[in-house]
Amino acid sequence: MRRFALFIVISAAIAVAGCHKNKPPITRPAPPPSAAPATQAARPPSPPEPVAEPTVVPPEPVRDDAIANAPLDELNRNSLLKPVFFELDSSDVNAEGQSVLNADAAILKKYPTWTVTVEGHCDERGSAEYNLALGERRAVAARAYLVSLGIAADRLRTVSYGKEFPFDPGHDEAAFAKNRRAHFVITAK
Amino acid sequence: MKIRTTFFLVPTLALATAVLVAQTQQPPPPTPPPQQPSEVITTITSGDGAAPRFAVPDFIALTPDAETQTIAKTIGQVLWDDLNFEREFALIPRDVYATIPAAHGMNDVPFDRWRELNADGVIIGTVQKTANGIRVEARLFNLKTQQMAWGKQYEGSGANPRSYAHTISDEVHEQQRALKGIARSRLTFDSDRDGERMTGTVEQRGVKEIYISDYDGENQRRVTATRSLNINPTWSPDARSIVYTSYRHGLPNIFISHIYQATMEELTKNAGNNWLPVFSPDGTKIAFGSTRDGVNQIYVMNRDGSNVHRLTSGPAINTTPTWSPSGTQIAFTSARTGDPAIYIIGADGLNLQRLTSDGYADRPTWSPAPFNEIAYASRTGSGLDIKVIDIATRRVTQLTFGEGTNESPAYSPNGRHIAFTSTRAGKMQVFTMSRDGKNIRQITRVGNNEQPNWSNVQK
């Protein structure tokens, strides 16, 4: 059953890839890292603190070479590559995940020298052992979709951390949803 | 890490107290057994069919220094706990011993007074300082006959008095009940207790290192120092090596640490993700899970990493292997029909059969003989619970009931106990329980501690 689901995903991926061949990927410059608050997900969110109104520093327009020249750590802290989220016990990339991966693929095409580790992660409701395999499936599903969009397979390696590194340490569905993900770490550029 | 030097004792005791990782010495050479007093083989019974009632007072310090006195007290207390753990004897609580005058040696034991406590047996022990360490003598007396039922003398280091108690306990169980005690066995598990952080692209993540401890949670010691993720530790059958999954080079691969030699081998090298290694009962092979051919499958390799062959196939996940006690079968988790469930396959890859049908199930652990069952983690609601399935009858018994989430069961070498992890006390901790789910005991308390595995008693 899973296999068919995966095939559907891959066929869908190939279909999307086909569309993209006709329509070249977006070549707009990527948004500046500072304007992307959603990228903090690599750390568990800290509790809101009542603070004085911060002095707002207007974001400087970031040129392409600023990203190209940024150190790896900085790139991964404010990553342009957005994670893909999964349903419970599932490694199927859904429509929302596909649109995230479409954008990620565009970035990977823009920076063709980047190599990326696709990390698979799980929530705590599965067992520690099985989650290793499930997380790997998620990473592979995300990778397969990116490859179907034309990203070279040898730029993407997969690793699973099971439920060892939850992004949100909470024990509710909101936390679980954030923890069931494929996460991208740039390892070379 | 403290390094202890050579011990000169009964071989079993030397191994039980031997040391870890950082040590570069070879284990002590086997020494000839010490002189033993004559043994009178008698089995102590209660007379009414109930468990025999035993008293274990503090051992007697024959030398008056404080260290020997502390050792004598420790051995008595630990021996009481060790014997109590197997529930073969009814241990009389130590706080009622105060009314009984302490003996000064084996020759003035007040048998009548112990009999008044309704004890069937009493273990009297002495500790004496020697030039090289200590000499410990223990005797079990049958209080009905006032004769010695068992007795033995040990010599060795005084650095770990608990190991003398563990050895005495195992020998008393063997001699009195024909039971393989586990007091000299050890646990291994992974732990994030050091609060260390990774470096590199994922620097904010906590590391996990492999730890070991005595069966009762004492003497917890670190085995790895990689500053990365180390999980899935399991013992070699000789209890001298630990095979585990390490992410020290990025991808998960299988490593083996020979903890008495301070040496390590990398058994798989970056061909996919490799994890969940388990030794075959004869110690010659290791089963593990790997994604080297795409989908996660079960593989078997020689203990040096050579001769890898695949056991399972198909498009679904197959993972988390465990060997049958004979080494002829492997149970594992497969998602081939949807939710992961437990299956059994021959070690030759033939005769696949499905074992569980109660929904999400993982971490099968095959019991040692004479039990013929498999413990596993089952999703029972928002979390997991430990269940046991009888292989012959397929009868399922649930052992935990939603006190936190309960995972990763591992049998003691005599099959009478199960180590597991639970969040019932807050963070994820290692616990042990009897195979009926009773007598729950917390083993770890610092950090998160997971995926326990229980060693054999070293020969």
Image: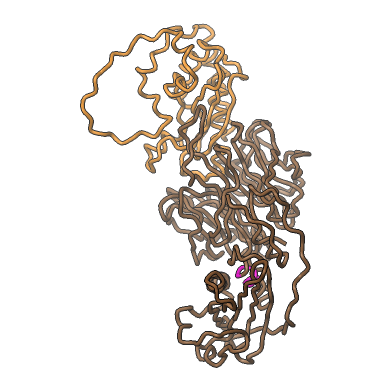
Chain colours: A orange, B brown
Q: Identify which residue, B150 or A9, lies in the foreground.
A: B150
Q: Is residue B380 left or right of residue B105?
A: left
- Residue sitting farthest toward the left: A52
Residue at the image position 52 percent from the left and 47 percent from the top: B191
In the image, residue A176 lies in the stretch drawn in magenta: no
Position of residue A87 relative to residue B66, above or below, is: above
Counting from the top left corner in percent of width and height, residue B326 is at 74, 57
Q: Is residue B22 left or right of residue B191?
A: right
Residue depicted at 56% across the width and 72% down the height: B68
Q: Position of residue A175 (x, y in %)?
A: 39, 37
Which quadrant of the structure image shows residue B135?
Answer: bottom right
User: Residue B142, position in %: x, y?
Assistant: 63, 87
Give the vertical position of B429 relative to A7 (above or below). below
Residue B435 shows in the view: yes
Q: Could you tell me which residue is drawn at 52 percent across and 6 percent down?
A: A22
Q: Position of residue A40 (x, y in %)?
A: 39, 27
Q: Total marks drawn?
A: 0
Tell me, yes or no, whether the highlighted magenta stretch contains residue B169. yes
- The quarter of the rendered structure image containing the N terminus of chain A is top right
Name above or below for residue B271 compared with residue A188: below
Res B323 seen here: no
Nearer to me, A155 or A96 = A155
Which portion, as a residue range, is magenta? B165-170
Nearest the viewer among B416 and B375 is: B416
Locate residue A47: give its quadrant: top left
Quadrant containing the C terminus of chain A is: top right
Main structural element of the magenta stretch: helix, strand or loop?
Answer: helix
